[in-house]
């Protein structure tokens, strides 16, 4: 079996929450294999930001897309070949700022993508500007006197737009996080995994999260319960917080067909066109 | 005088004008005549003014004409707009329930329809009945046509047509006895030919966001694609469309997207993505008058410069534009294939005047290209997605595979891992530049320029204007050499530079002369003889013939 | 031999390398020497390898040099990467706590910092202390510098610097006694000069989404803008940025946006919107190596073709590129003004090598242009936004007004109401085309091309490469005529075509030679002498001098 | 006083719900004037679609923006000159499809824009494709066998992302609709007005709406109540359904300053730059 690491030099700051995400993923891959997801069917799609470096650091087939747009590419991969399992590592700026629309539509369609959001509350790679989830008052180089916008709440937003799997993990709970990744990839539909990721340089949330995070074992069973769970103010629940069964987008479109696998050979296809044109 | 018979039907949107045009076309096709149908419509759903022009000839024909033998006006506005387009000896028929006129023949099209449900929607049947009468057909033929074309509420349609037949016959019967032609093939809209070319070329997935005049391709592939195993997706935006397409190509699907100028603008970031990833994606860019929202339902050729320069950074791309509906079939397949051969984005640049015009074509599906890239056959060590080869083309491999396949939007090393080191950056630039040269080499071996006729002045044109120019020459009896570059980037300098010193006439639909500039830029050939139309309308052959004559 | 003194400091991101460079610059400025600082950094926040090069001269200087008199290596990687850049007689100083070496002077920079909090962040202070010592300064001077530049935790910094001073003095004291210069003005980064030029030119609102290497403009304007009444907004995407900017211009605010290639790609739809609306918006496009995400923190000149052709449809635009930091100040104001005068989008095309390099400049704010459009003074009847004038420019009016003001993305009549009629469509195209001609006319009256030197071979270059070429000529003692088109669209053919037949050397940072192609396209001037660098690095003057010599 | 109509020929289908929106707006303008909004301060911004024709048919200062992007332009207008009152007529495809991200960010910022969404459940101008609010199974030319996506719910979505004023109107209740427009324009913040607009050609909902619409006089006072009201299944409540007070974006940014009105003259501005550079 190939090494999961690569020769790329790691460029994250010491202490960054991203290391745990990388390691959790490396732990998740063999678990996925054990659960029947062959490694060669796994495709890693990454956005642009510190989170995106998952692409360089992981020796897996992958697609390093555009800032904010990798969720669209991820859907294209799945729709071209539904046999593939797609995991999409994105940033909070990436997927809720530049790419918010694609995130919402992927959820709305129940596209079968495991979306892992490195939620650090900053545009880290571009030196710490506020993101759509930054609290009002956050000071970064584009808002030196504090942003005047209120944050979006990723979990309730995803619930609102139809995500069928909603989970939260934490860089401080590596094994738990690995298990959440496994669940997300195995989910037959859109899986949103919000990872609380401290950015030691621009937004060091280690202490807050260590104090508030609490593992929840039972997902909420109704949207109302889910909303209540997501917005608890005393604690930050982590775990699979909500899930429901629903047919994924590719199956709604083609049933069990696969455009690539089931493609007719050239002669047959062209003969069919010729018949029509005759 | 050439044997050209032209029928115009005008009315409000919602009165079935386009459908009347189509049925008229089918009737002229029954006579094995060559056809050209141009639909003129506005960006609205009901009301306003629409018209369809169907020209036909027993000989070759590549454009509608606006001088018509038979004009049917379903409303008063059509009468005022089209009466001056009547040819000598032509007949104008109008709906006497909504207007009166001194010239022309009035028929009570609406009141005769009143006994039946939705009389307003039935007047189209009157228009084609009038045509049938004028062509000398009997009621039996008309019934057959109605059965074929207006199946819904067939009985009432036939009853209504019989009444119109009776009223029209006395003045019109057999007024235009037309010669049979030898036309072959099918009457196809450009959008259909493009769709079918893509299917024949191996398309798997098509993504789009609706935008005139590219939407008919989406609609065609959504409706007909699944029969061939082709799926069409209407997504949330053009940005998503283009990024999804690159993902789809990564997974190995033959993928195309379609849009118009504004949508293409939103795709340029992903166009550049395809450039660095070396992703094979066909972009279909169907132009309408710009800039910006412009004039959605009309035609222009002002996206050429944008298409050629689109996307940030240096990377190879191929841009080509079909001159006729039939050429659009083959060229679509070719560009899908070239995208795969050279792992580069390609653009089929076309215009409303092609996608939404209909003419005879005899495409041979078996002669269409089939998109196929150079596949990885194994090499020393692990697979390298961006192996630096001499041709610049790195062998392809798609998941699932036991090899690791990495496509990246960052500058990368051969494996696909990010680099910011000077050596690898330059090496990848060099590799892609070699690919550009390989493309040029390939183009030198295929037909990149069409030349029609010889002697006389040299006329440069491209895209759908080619059809207009050829018809203008026929109409005006003009001898000329028409040079139509099909490929525009890389530009076939080696073919075109032969015409150096010819002071060509350059015919195009752009106020700034984008095509003339491109020729000058690429070949140094300059000209002071330009014919440019930029009012949203395609060239009219007689007018264009006159403009050409004025210059020679 | 020219009097050029170069200092390089290298280390990990997070060790304050850029800051060390800035302080070094300020110390050399204290000697009234001309400066050029180039910051080389990677797309990461901690670790990796960063370095700053500060060159200085008592005479003119327009580039950093890589042959250094003094190199300070804060980590081992810096040592390996920079040791070969040592000039004859130069000194290399390294941090002996993290490495050992045979050549060079080791100083225990980390262990000396240990008594104080966060020792890792303090090594930058060591680097500039070493420089001060080598320049012959005493500890009093160093204290002053630290007070000025490292105010936070001042006391510890001074104590630490004293220790380094003591350790370094024996071997280094006064090693490089530099001549005082006559430099004037301020050391400014390109991004600051652009921001200040925009402010001086009357900017009201700036919108952006962060993207290297344009982000420093956003950060500067966000921090400093409000003092001048200028506001900077960081929005959800570049698509939003560009559309918001057009809205802002409609309401009368002087508006600019800034981005790099990928973000500009997302703006092209709104760029075309500005074209049809005739909206005055300045687009600042700071390039990095492409295509796509490319190499975010390095430099290239491969967005030229894209900028010139961007946006669907035919419409006038102005593209210009500054050759020096000072020029970027004036040109930004000029382009804001031209946007307003001609109600057209304008593009300031520049590169990382300008926005993120620092050099002396003496911009005179009072000489900056002030953006001002031709305002409506009343005419017959109601206000017509798109009045067809001879110049193509229609007088402006902003809300609130008792007149009705209509800006539209559709093709429109003079009032601004949608049209699909052929006459009005053509009339608006003609009007905008006349505006293009008015722009050309205007450009003919101003300086559009800079020419440096005379005699010798002709060298064409543009943008930040201009600085490199001028420095290469100084360094190599080469006589040549440097022709730098500042304006690139409309291209100043009238100026450049003088050099026909000169077989110029074309220097640029693009693998495909976009600039050389543009010259050929616009003027017919061809060349077989090209110098192209495309590894993300700016030209190095000695190397470039050699390349030029090889060609002449 | 100028006529509110223009010489542009009306191009909507007879029976279209857009006529009522146009007429309601024409009725709203004098009411707004009576309420202190001078007509010359009113700016009409339109998206691209059948709804956008409001621009051509109304003799008011206006901005006919890009498909999906007019909300961004509207915000630009307001931020350039906060004295202006901006009303943005958008389509459901326009503002929830192509432009979803801009709509959400305008709400999140509490940008003071009155957004009037012509909610007809189709891309009408481009011949009837499904939109983000179309029900699953909707057949249009891009989904001839029915769309497989589930719809977004515009009102709950707007609540989720922070809209401070949420209303629903109906083309069949013209006077009521006019009053809602007045309220929306007067609201000091982001006002979302969803107008149930039957499209007789592609999605004729007149009967359903006539049957189900019910005027509600009291807005919900909490988000929970609001959600319940928005999602009632027995009736379609119309009226101002939710509102709360919050400082609008331009005031958060500049207080009462106005970049255009308060601009220093050339000499002063340039002198200030010169001082800095000295
Ligand atoms: C179109 C475009 N705009 C801007 C950028 C620059 N950019 C790169 S990363 C980034 C922000 C990343 O923030 P986030 O997604 O939160 O990732 P993080 O670095 O925090 O992991 C930006 C703005 C880009 N690459 N492309
Ligand atoms: C970028 C872009 N993509 C596509 C279009 C084509 N287009 C014009 S209107 C429209 C749909 C309009 O639907 P909606 O917003 O619901 O408005 P309606 O016509 O229903 O009022 C589309 C797709 C466009 N103008 N611009
Ligand atoms: S900047 Fe923040 S997110 Fe990026 S590597 Fe450092 S700690 Fe992690
Ligand atoms: S198509 Fe629908 S929305 Fe458009 S005008 Fe007709 S009825 Fe109204
Ligand atoms: Mg982040
Ligand atoms: Mg709609």
Image (cartoon, coloured by chain):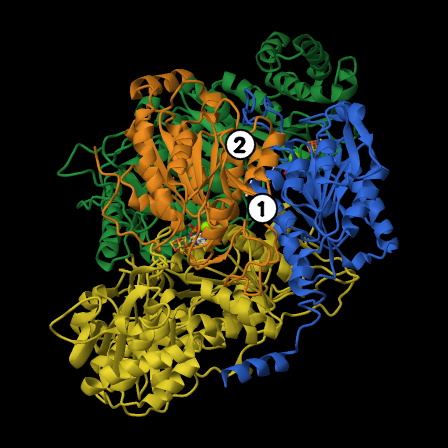
Chain colours: A blue, B yellow, C green, D orange
Helix, strand or loop status at disc 2: loop
Position of residue B327 relative to residue C347, above or below, is: below
Residue D9 place in picture, x, y as percent: 26, 52
Residue marked by disc 1: D152
The numbered mark 1 sits on a residue in which chain?
A: D
Res A22 → quadrant: top right
Res B61 → quadrant: bottom left
Q: How crowded is mark 2: few (under 14 residues within 10 Å), some or many (20 or more)?
A: many
Residue marked by disc 2: D163
Q: Which mark is residue B305?
A: none
Residue C487 place in picture, x, y as percent: 34, 43
- Specify whether B25 is left or right of B432: left
At 67% from the left edge and 73% from the top edge, which residue is drawn? A263
First in sequence: mark 2 vs mark 1: 1
At 22% from the left edge and 63% from the top edge, which residue is drawn? B77
Asked if residue C203 can be seen in this view, the reply is: yes
Res B401 → quadrant: bottom right
Quadrant of the image containing the C terminus of chain B: bottom left
**Residue sitting nearer the eye, A70 or C2:** A70
Q: How crowded is mark 1: few (under 14 residues within 10 Å), some or many (20 or more)?
A: many
Q: Which residue lies furthest to the left in this view?
A: B102
Ligand 5 shown in quarter: top right
Quadrant of the image containing the N terminus of chain B: bottom left
Residue A266 place in picture, x, y as percent: 62, 79
Is the CB of the residue bearing disc 2 within 8 angstroms of ligand 2? no
The numbered mark 2 sits on a residue in which chain?
A: D
**Residue sitting nearer the eye, C241 or C56:** C241
**Residue sitting nearer the eye, B547 or B190:** B190
Mark 2 to mark 1 CA distance (whole Å): 16 Å
């Amino acid at each position: 079996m190939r090494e999961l690491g690569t020769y790329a030099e790691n460029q994250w700051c010491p202490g960054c929450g991203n290391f745990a995400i990388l390691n959790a993923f490396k732990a998740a891959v063999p678990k996925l294999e054990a659960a029947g997801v062959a490694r060669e069917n796994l495709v890693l799609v990454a956005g642009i930001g510190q989170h995106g470096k998952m692409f360089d650091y992981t020796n897996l087939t992958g697609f390093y897309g555009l800032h904010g747009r990798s969720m669209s590419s991820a859907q294209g991969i799945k729709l071209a070949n539904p046999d593939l399992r797609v995991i999409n590592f994105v940033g909070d700026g990436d997927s809720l700022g530049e790419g918010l629309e694609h995130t919402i539509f992927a959820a709305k369609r129940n596209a079968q993508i495991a979306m892992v959001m490195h939620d650090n509350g900053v545009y880290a790679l571009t030196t710490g500007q506020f993101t759509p989830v930054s609290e009002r008052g956050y000071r970064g180089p584009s808002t030196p006197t504090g942003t005047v916008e209120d944050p979006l709440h990723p979990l309730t937003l995803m619930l609102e737009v139809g995500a069928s799997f909603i989970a939260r993990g934490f860089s401080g709970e590596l094994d738990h996080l690995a298990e959440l990744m496994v669940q997300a990839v195995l989910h037959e539909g859109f899986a949103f995994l919000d990872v609380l990721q401290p950015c030691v340089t621009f937004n060091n949330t280690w202490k807050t999260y260590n104090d508030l995070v609490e593992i929840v074992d039972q997902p909420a069973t109704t949207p109302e319960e889910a909303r209540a769970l997501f917005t608890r103010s005393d604690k930050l629940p982590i775990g699979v917080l909500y899930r429901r069964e629903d047919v994924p987008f590719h199956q709604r479109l083609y049933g069990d067909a696969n455009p690539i696998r089931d493609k007719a050979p050239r002669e047959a296809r062209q003969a069919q066109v010729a018949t029509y044109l005759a | 005088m050439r044997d050209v018979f032209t029928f115009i039907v005008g009315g409000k949107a919602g009165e079935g004008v386009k459908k009347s045009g189509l049925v008229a076309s089918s009737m002229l096709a029954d006579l094995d005549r060559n056809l050209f149908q141009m639909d003129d419509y506005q960006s609205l759903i009901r009301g306003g003014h629409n018209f369809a022009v169907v020209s036909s000839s027993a000989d070759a024909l590549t454009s509608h004409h606006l001088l018509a033998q038979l004009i049917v006006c379903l409303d008063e506005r059509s009468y005022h707009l089209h009466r001056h387009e009547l040819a000598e000896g032509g007949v104008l028929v109008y709906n006497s329930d909504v207007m009166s006129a001194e010239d022309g023949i009035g028929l009570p099209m609406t009141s005769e329809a009143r006994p039946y449900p939705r009389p307003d929607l039935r007047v189209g049947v009157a228009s084609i009945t009038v045509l049938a009468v004028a062509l000398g057909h009997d009621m039996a033929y008309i019934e057959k046509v109605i059965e074929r074309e207006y199946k819904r509420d067939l009985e009432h349609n036939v009853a209504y047509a019989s009444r119109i037949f009776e009223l029209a016959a006395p003045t019109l019967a057999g007024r235009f006895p037309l010669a049979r032609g030898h036309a072959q093939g099918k009457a196809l809209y450009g959008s259909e030919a493009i769709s079918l070319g893509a299917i024949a070329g191996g398309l798997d997935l098509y993504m789009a966001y609706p935008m005139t005049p590219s939407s008919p391709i989406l609609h065609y592939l959504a409706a007909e694609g699944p029969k061939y195993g082709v799926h069409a997706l209407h997504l949330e935006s053009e940005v998503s469309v283009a990024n999804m397409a690159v993902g789809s190509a990564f997974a190995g699907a033959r993928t195309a997207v379609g849009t118009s100028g504004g949508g293409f603008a939103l795709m340029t970031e992903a166009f550049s993505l395809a450039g660095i990833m070396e992703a094979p994606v066909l972009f279909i860019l169907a132009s309408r008058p710009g800039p910006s929202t412009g004039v959605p339902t009309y035609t222009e050729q002002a996206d050429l410069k944008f298409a050629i320069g689109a996307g940030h950074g240096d990377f190879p791309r191929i841009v080509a534009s079909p001159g006729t509906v039939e050429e659009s079939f083959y060229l679509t397949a070719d560009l899908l294939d070239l995208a795969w051969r050279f792992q580069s984005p390609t653009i089929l640049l076309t215009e409303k005047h092609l996608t939404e015009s209909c003419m005879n074509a005899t495409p041979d599906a078996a002669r269409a290209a089939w998109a196929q890239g150079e596949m990885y056959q194994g090499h020393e060590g692990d697979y390298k997605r961006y192996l630096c080869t001499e041709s610049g083309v790195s062998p392809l491999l798609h998941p699932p595979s036991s090899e690791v396949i990495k496509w990246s939007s960052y500058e990368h090393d051969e494996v696909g891992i990010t680099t910011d080191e000077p050596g690898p950056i330059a090496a990848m630039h060099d590799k892609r530049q070699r690919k550009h040269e390989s493309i040029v080499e390939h183009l030198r071996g295929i037909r990149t320029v069409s030349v029609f006729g010889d002697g006389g002045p040299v006329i440069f044109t491209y895209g759908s204007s080619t059809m207009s120019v050829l018809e203008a020459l026929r109409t005006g009896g003009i001898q000329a050499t028409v040079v139509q570059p099909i490929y525009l980037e890389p530009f076939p300098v080696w073919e075109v530079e032969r015409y150096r010193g010819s002071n060509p006439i350059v015919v195009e639909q752009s106020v700034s002369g984008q095509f003339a500039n491109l020729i000058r830029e690429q070949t140094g050939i300059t000209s002071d003889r330009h014919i440019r139309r930029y009012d949203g309308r395609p060239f009219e052959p007689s007018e264009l013939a006159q403009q050409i004559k004025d210059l020679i």
